[in-house]
Amino acid sequence: MSSVTVRVPAKVNVQLSVGPLREDGYHDLVNVFHAVSIFDEVVAKESESITVVVNGKWSDQVPTDDNNLAIRAARALAKHAGRTYGAELIIQKDIPVAGGMAGGSADAAGALVACNELWGLGLPFEDLMEIAGDLGSDVPFSLLGGTAVGTGRGEQLSELPTGGTFHWVFALANGGLSTASVYAECDRLRAASGAQVPWPQLDDDLMEALGTGDAYSLGAHLSNDLQQAALNLRPELGPTLEAGRQHGALGAIVSGSGPTCAFLAIDALHASDLALSLTSTGAAHTAVAAHGPVRGATLA
Ligand code: ATP
């Protein structure tokens, strides 16, 4: 095989509960991931060494050296296989960079699936999940897709059944937010308030809404403990969220560490109307309608 193409989705967190800061600097999380139909494409082509090319409107914000998560994934896979392999990775980037939608993790997951195929390794999904877990806490979910709850640092995943398709609008911001700086702001806010941080718990009402496919209830139970921190760092997101609510969004939330804002719509038609309203009123410069859940990294 001389070329393999893989499509990988973005994610939104429909619940992101952040526990107290641990001694190792991480937080215990309850993180309900939901894969949505905004995709990066990763093509792996035969080559002597592992290299990456990034195309698409976000490409100038993505490193092409060894810091690129797709390169790190391909190297980790080759190491696991115990041999030196090469691949030219070509990424078509549609997932916003540093947007709270796990775009880098998506590319890492895409590279694992693509190189497993290109190099004829035939490693089972479980092995790819293990390598993914070492690459970053969102990478296993990018492989898995669907809807799933992550505990621990987010990397211990259990799939969640959903009772239907949900329709979303994502307002993309100019420029990203670093996940580390949002967590640091969250810790700062908590230290300043002095309040006891509760242990994170899975929201039963949210589970039920996902299971029955009830968009109204899901919209009412979306939650993100990082939202206030993201709003402190990017105050202009407050009016964007408010504009979505004014235009009938069932729920409006910062996606993960932001700055992308996620709006839950009633149906596909409402999602396209909402996207148009957000851009035409200037509440968002770009708004994309999408649906979920969708499959994780998949061979095209
Ligand atoms: P998360 O939602 O998992 O916290 P994010 O969506 O906010 O992540 P990413 O798009 O994954 O953020 O990018 C975070 C940083 O990772 C970027 O600023 C970029 O420098 C770096 N990076 C490395 N490889 C990639 C890649 N293939 N695509 C995007 N960013 C990458």
Image (cartoon, rainbow, N blue to C red):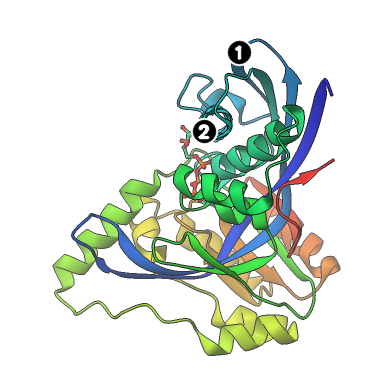
Quarter of the image where one finds residue 42: top right
Image quadrant where one finds the C terminus:
top right
Residue in front for this viewpoint, 178 or 154: 154
Label 1 environment density (alpha carbons within 10 Å; few <14, some 14–19, many ≥20): few
- Label 2 residue SS: helix
Image quadrant where one finds the N terminus:
top right
How far separated are the C-alphas under marks 1 and 2?
Answer: 14 Å
Any part of residue 28 in sight: yes
Any part of residue 282 in sight: no
User: Residue 213 at x, y = what percent?
Assistant: 75, 82
Which residue is under mark 2?
A: 76
Residue in front for this viewpoint, 196 or 128: 128
Is 259 above or below relative to 187?
Answer: above
Q: In this view, does 10 lie to the left or right of 105?
A: right
User: Residue 280 at x, y = what percent?
Assistant: 71, 52
Is 30 above or below relative to 8?
Answer: below
Label 2 environment density (alpha carbons within 10 Å; few <14, some 14–19, many ≥20): some
**Is the distance from the Cβ of mark 2 to the nearest ligand 1 atom less than 8 Å?**
no
| Numbered circle sitting on residue 233 | none
Residue at 54% in and 65% down: 157
Residue at 23% in and 63% down: 22
Quarter of the image where one finds residue 199: bottom left
Amino acid at the residue labelled 1? Ser
Which residue is under mark 1?
A: 49
Is 198 above or below relative to 169?
Answer: below
**Is the distance from the Cβ of mark 1 to the nearest ligand 1 atom less than 8 Å?**
no
Residue in front for this viewpoint, 267 or 141: 141
User: Residue 180 at x, y = what percent?
Assistant: 33, 47
User: Residue 142 at x, y = what percent?
Assistant: 62, 51
